[in-house]
Amino acid sequence: MQEKSLRVLEFNKIKEKLKFYAVTSGGKELIDNLMPYNTCFEVRNKLKESNEALDILIKKGSPPFEGLYDVRDGLNRAEKDGVLTAEQLLRIGAMLRCARRFKDYIPKEEDEISYPKLKDLAYILTPIKALEQEIENAIVSEEEISDRASATLFRIRKSLKEKNASVREKINGIVRANSKFLQDSLYTMRGDRYVLPVKTEYKGAVPGLVHDQSSSGATLFIEPMSLVNLNNEIKELFLKEKAEIERILTELSGKVSDNIEECVNNSKILLELDFIFAKGKYASSLNAICPEISEDRSFDIIQVRHPLIDPKIVVPSDIYLGKEFTAIMITGPNTGGKTVMLKTVGLVHLMALSGLLIPARDGSTVSFFKEVFADIGDEQSIEQSLSTFSSHMTNIVTIMENADEDSLVLFDELGSGTDPVEGAALAVSIIDTLRDRGTRLIATTHYSELKGYALKTEGIENASVEFDLETLRPTYRLLIGVPGKSNAFEISRRLGLSNDVISKAKDYMSDENLQFEDLIRELQEKSILANRDAREAKKIKLEAEDIKKKYEEKLNRLEEVRDKAYEEARRDARDIVANAKDEADDILKAMRELEKLGIEQGGRKRLEEERKKLKDGLEERENSLYKMKENQGEVMEKVTLGMEVFLPSLNQKVIVISMPDSRGEVQVEAGIMKINVKLKDLRKSNGVPEKKEKKAREVKINFRSIESRVDLRGMDSEEACYTTDKYLDDAYLGNLSEVVVVHGKGTGVLRNAINNMLKRHPHVKSYRLGVYGEGGDGVTIVNLK
């Protein structure tokens, strides 16, 4: 990818924002080196990594990177058998602790949601608990070794404390005895030795060694002779302590060296994970999604937003290319957003090709381009004698030399800076040449000739940025299929220019141009209405398809439960009948035994008759299990909620839990099943009084297919509130007590809209933001009534 395109499209600014979310200098280094990947396989893998990081951040909160540093320098030193400092060892211990905790942070295999990419990386991590524990026990801070590091160090420091206590006690006595010879009644330290501030004129009164003199010369710092031996002993203990600390650091460095391969590997994996989770955190701040990657050089990006513009003011737009047409000609007034749209398309592709999630709606697709070329902005140079036209043409020449069928080319104000006729002709020629190569391109222009060229040329589509004549402001929305209009006359009229002047101006224009402008206006008005209706229709269609899919799943599940219940009932009935037959045969056998013992001959005949009668009765009952008892009981013409009725098809009593619908069907509860039946198939249950109407909560439908969470990321506030309201209705009917609303962090606009809606929702008992392990501020936990 050309460095110039990355700079013009401001990809470096994206990397600077991304670095804010990295913990280590190594992670920031990986971000500095981030570039679009060379193969579609790599792009898809990196996008999956970023998406998994975003998902797990929402569900489990921030990863356990506390205390993680880039420890490559320390590991390089240990690999060469060097002695590490306490600071380096402490950071290596923190790195090992992060590696151990991260393996627990990633969900296990048995968990419902899988993160294959992150699990593969976590699997490579090798916890070294023993070394981690030794470093933690031995080193307190970057400059302090713990007393527990070794028994020898403990004894040395204990002796030091005792010696220091003895010296302080003794020197306090010396201070009291010689206070008249001292500048101040206190002692001080010089070079780790206890000394007294003696006045110069009394230096003979306090025998000892002179260590220092004040700047004025009035004070000598003398070590009393009685303290020399004690100070010497303390000095020796300090040297022993230093030697023991060196020995401890050498020993720990050796253990790091013994595990150097595992430590180096853990460090590399954690730096990579830091980089991946930085991408996830940045995606959360953008409310970004994972796009599909197309290899046919077409893309369709839905409600895309420029990632560097304030989310509060940025206007999302749809843009697509590559299916019905391979080039787009964007026209419209200045400051209308044409250049922003060009940069958005280019930057979003660079982000996706670098493994970053993009600020758009779910279902968006970007294409795998090997090169993205951009000629945007004015780079005229006085030193190089380049005019605006020359600077543009220099860039265009480079693009023409390198662009091919795997390239996306973005031209801003193509052909500008020179004679309009020649510039328009040159622009048409450039576009035709690139289209012949199969290059995908988007260009902005003010030339009317290019609008007409796009209208009559197959494979090129006009587009424009919408302009509101009422407010005289651009809306920044892109309208594909409609050429732009300058709106100069309308704007001038609304700003106060007289109609006479405008009429004269129109006289200077040809009738064809006026008609063309009027046609553009009509097309624009119709396109706006058509696009609005199309968006509404698409939204309704998606909702209908979603509802249809849900209810088909529910119906299939209910049918499975019903068939299973039928089969179990038949099996139980067959077992009962078989047991009854066996029991009858046993009774008959016993009677035959009795007959042999002397019962009269006529008894056998009667027994056979009873046996046949019993057998016929059992067989009749067995057959009745499979027949509909449609004519049994009184037909129900009217029912109420909670009424107990008889259902012949199941041969059992059921409870009515819904009133008849337009098709004459009611829903009834039969044990654990809830099924829809015709009202005419129900019969009055004799001898059983009707039950009172149950409370609404007792007749709720318990559909097991209701998810416990709803994901709103990528939606605008209105759609998110609508989706949440519908989901809460389903969850309430599904008898769920607690659900999770995933809205992401971002700017907080979506979260605030959802919370405002939850305050007034009739099904909501309470709600709160998620805590660590639940998704943090990116989710809201809702308790239902």
Image (spheres, rainbow, N blue to C red):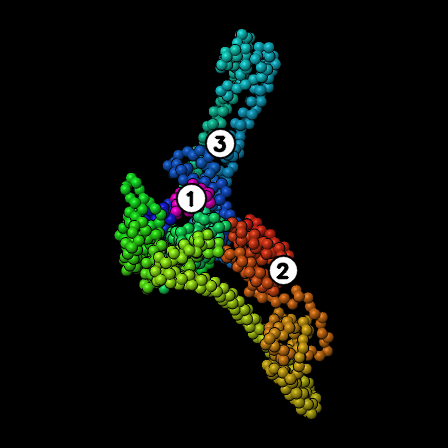
Marks 2 and 3, how far apart at CA: 58 Å
Q: Does residue 150 appear anywhere in the picture?
A: no
Image spot of residue 156 (x, y percent): 52, 27
Marks 1 and 2, how far apart at CA: 44 Å
The boundaries of the magenta stretch are: 10-32
**What is the number of the mark on residue 16?**
1
**What is the number of the mark on residue 143?**
3
Image spot of residue 31 (x, y percent): 40, 45
Q: Residue at x 52, y 34 (%)?
A: 140
Circle 3 — which element? loop
Name the amino acid type tagged 1.
Glu
Q: Residue at x 55, y 71 (%)?
A: 555
Q: Nearer the viewer, mark 2 or mark 3?
A: 2
Residue under numbered circle 2? 763
Asked if marks 2 and 3 touch (Cβ < 8 Å), the reply is no
- As rendered, which of 1 and 59 lies closer to the eye? 1
Asked if marks 1 and 3 touch (Cβ < 8 Å), the reply is no
Name the amino acid type tagged 3.
Glu
Question: Mark 2 or mark 1, which is nearer the start of the sequence?
Answer: 1
Marks 1 and 3, how far apart at CA: 33 Å
Q: Residue at x 59, y 81 (%)?
A: 626
Q: Nearer the viewer, mark 1 or mark 3?
A: 1
Asked if marks 1 and 2 touch (Cβ < 8 Å), the reply is no
Question: Mark 3 or mark 2, which is nearer the start of the sequence?
Answer: 3
